[in-house]
Image: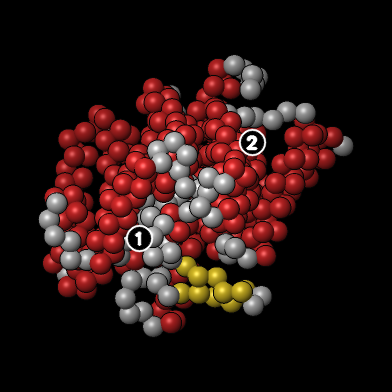
Amino acid sequence: MINKQQKIIRVITDFSFVSFIFTEMFLRYTIISQFSILLFCSIFILNCLRKSKIYFDTFFTLSLLLIILSMFQSISGVSISSYTTNEMTKTLITNFFVALATYNYLIDSKDIEKNLNIFAGFGLLLSFFIAFLTFQSGYIDRFGSEISINIFGKYVSYNSNDIALISGFSFLFYLYKFSCYKKSKVTIILVWLFAIILLTGSRKGLLLLSIGALIILVLMNRKNIIKNIFLIISFGSLCYLIIFYVPFFYQVIGIRIEALFNLFNGNAINEASAATRNLYILRGWISFLEKPWLGYGFDCFRHLPYSYGTYSHNNYIELLISGGIPAFFFYYYPRVKALLILKNKWRQEKINVLFIAYLIGLLIIEIGMVSYYDRIYIIVFVFVISSYKKIKLKKLGGSVNE
């Protein structure tokens, strides 16, 4: 009877996790996704009460401090827009419970790779779904742009960069699987996801794919390092030829890559998106230096005179503007700590190589995106910290001291 009851609880818990991941990718900001979040977090709380146990990490302590900082800014008048900061505080609180629920779910589950397979599988499914919608609407420019569907009277929009990054995380997972199991059918998935990323015209997606693939190919099989270097050079050459010598791909992504090179080389930037982002970084840095410890309030970059009512498109600048050095530390300390831990543990579990690729990739692409409040990227990081927590628990014989 007890075993049957435990199986039922496990099935319900698994369902809540799967539905949460699915709706977060496909139906974000709809009533369906809100219900999935509520269900997932409610079951997490009930399981904690049932077992009288909860897993915790430094990441969650600092996330709480980030929330307290945001609340303090609103109450004290530090924020230049209390309403905006209050709204972001609500998002941070929701994300905290979602992250904690995901962390406990992953540690309780027997196989993180299996759950990551679900995440990557939904990412692959999303690419097929967006492909269908794109061709239905008449594909003109960047893949996935201007795509939306009506869900109970609310339009759900999809962003080319988000599609590319989710596809990028899925690509790296399947590359990891190919490196481990050498299944040839996985190459079809890799080619498809690579094509999707190119068609989105996303520099961040291509950068995530390139950096992550480099890390996985180098670390997964060091005995064949010469072969892997040849594969990397061949893959890079193929990318270069496709992007810069096929007119269609040059218009979609080649021009954008050129602008990125010009940005780093200090040359004139002719592409509007890159030029605007560069301007945000420069002006944001100047504003940060004026209030390095208190900031202007979370999500308040959009209220600065030069912001044109939008965010900074740079996670580092966004955090420094939002909450100064304390916010920057609260957010990035757990990530640096995780990277240092994984550096010493990647030989113990092969999947940690994938997580190193995820983490380094995120740290680099955050130069061109704001992700501190985006649940998809928080979930990716929770996968990372869950992995080395499970290694620690194995050494302790399954006990926990947090």
Task: Give whichever of 79, 400 is nearer the camera.
Answer: 79
**Disc number placed over residue 104 in the picture, else none:** 2
Q: Say left or right for 253 vs 350.
A: left
Cα separation, mark 1 vs mark 2, equals 42 Å
Mark 1 Cα-neighbour bin, 10 Å: few <14, some 14–19, many ≥20: few
Residue 366 appearing in the image: no
Circle 1 sits in a helix, a strand or a loop, which is it? Answer: loop
Q: Say left or right for 279 vs 371.
A: left
Residue type at tag 1: Tyr
Q: Who's the residue at 47% across and 47% down the image?
A: 296
Task: Give whichever of 188, 194 is nearer the camera.
Answer: 194
Closer mark to the observer between disc 1 and disc 2: 1
Q: Say left or right for 391 vs 44.
A: left
x, y percent for residue 175:
36, 46
Which of disc 2 and disc 1 is earlier in sequence?
A: 2
- 143 w.r.t. 187: above or below: below
x, y percent for residue 84:
56, 56
- 53 w.r.t. 243: above or below: above
Residue holding disc 1: 306
